[in-house]
Amino acid sequence: MGLFFLLFIDLSPDINLRLRTYIQSELLPAAINYYTETLQVVPLKKKLKATFNTICNFQTPTIFSNDGVDADLGVLISSGYEDSNYIAYARACVLSYINNR
């Protein structure tokens, strides 16, 4: 058992180049490595595919909606400015009705 996932990144153009570079070249590779090494799942038997036009109020990336991807988990990352009292959040947007993953 292993974890194979696809990462889709949509960073706001408002993010400066230094922060964008840090996110893409240091932060996300470290997170991917951590989850790949620590999580184990029963692999999906079919390709991961989205049948929705939007996921978490974002346009579904074409890679998820066409033929699907050989992955057990899809991670979509976006950024933007919000006037709030937190700096980041995460949530599950789409779960399989078959196995709730």
Image (cartoon, rainbow, N blue to C red):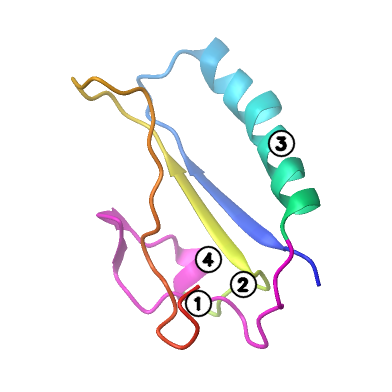
Residue that badge 1 annotates: 49
Please tell me whether mark 2 sits on a helix, a strand or a loop: loop
Residue in the picture at 37% in, 79% down:
51
Please tell me whether mark 1 sits on a helix, a strand or a loop: loop
Range shown magenta? 40-65
Q: Quadrant of residue 81?
A: top left
Q: Is residue 84 left or right of residue 93?
A: left
Residue that badge 3 annotates: 29
Tell me where residue 8 appears, x and y as whole percent.
53, 50
Please tell me whether mark 3 sits on a helix, a strand or a loop: helix
Q: Label 1 is placed on what type of residue? A: Lys
Q: What crowding class fits label 4: few (fewer than 14 Cα within 10 Å), some (14-19), or many (20 or more)?
A: some
Mark 1 to mark 2 CA distance (whole Å): 7 Å
Q: Are marks 2 and 4 in contact (CB under 8 Å)?
A: yes
Residue that badge 4 annotates: 63
Is label 2 or label 3 in front? 3
